[in-house]
Image: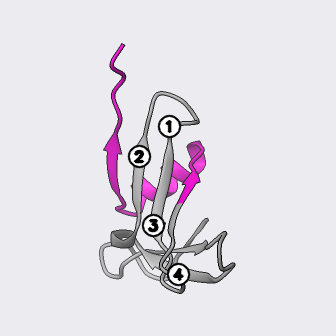
Amino acid sequence: MSVMHGMPAAIAPVFFKASCPDCRARFELSASALRLAIGASRRTTFYSFTCPECGSAVRKPAGERIVELLTGGGVRTLRLHSTV
């Protein structure tokens, strides 16, 4: 996952490069096409999207850098809370 910069975010939308593990397609997605879930651990922190090529639901782990890129790019974020 990487961010493509061209113009300031206030003027142009941010697009993210992504790929599908099922059909192996590579594409660019806008922030509105992605969802980020931040949990209490690495296992529960991930981003997801629907592959525009094959329609598969894709879920990938999100480390600190990915979280930083996605939140900075305007991706909708869900913070998961522990029930403990």
- Does the residue at mark 4 contact the one at mark 3 (Cβ under 8 Å)? no
Query: Which residue is rendered at x = 32% and y = 45% of the image?
Result: 78
- Quick one: label 4, few (<14), some, or many (20+) residues within 10 Å? some
- SS of the residue at dot 4? strand
In the image, residue 62 lies in the stretch drawn in magenta: yes
Query: Which residue is rendered at x = 35% and y = 82% of the image?
Result: 12
Gap between marks 1 and 4, in whole Å? 24 Å
Tag 2 residue: 37
Identify which amino acid the numbered label 4 is placed on. Glu
Range drawn in magenta: 59-84
Of tags 4 and 2, the one toward the viewer is 2
- Residue extending farthest bottom: 53
- SS of the residue at dot 3? strand
Of tags 4 and 3, the one toward the viewer is 3
Tag 1 residue: 44
Query: Which residue is rendered at x = 69% and y = 78% of the image?
Result: 24
Query: Which residue is rendered at x = 43% and y = 40% of the image?
Result: 38
Question: Left or right: where does residue 39 sit relative to residue 28?
Answer: left
In the rendered image, the vertical position of residue 64 relative to residue 83, given as above or below: below
**Residue closest to the eye, 62 or 49:** 49
Gap between marks 3 and 2, in whole Å? 12 Å
In the image, residue 21 lies in the stretch drawn in magenta: no
- Does the residue at mark 3 contact the one at mark 1 (Cβ under 8 Å)? no
Identify which amino acid the numbered label 3 is placed on. Phe
- Does the residue at mark 1 contact the one at mark 2 (Cβ under 8 Å)? yes
> Going from the N terminus, do you reach mark 4 or mark 3 first?
4
Of tags 1 and 4, the one toward the viewer is 1
- Quick one: label 2, few (<14), some, or many (20+) residues within 10 Å? some
Tag 3 residue: 49
Tag 4 residue: 28
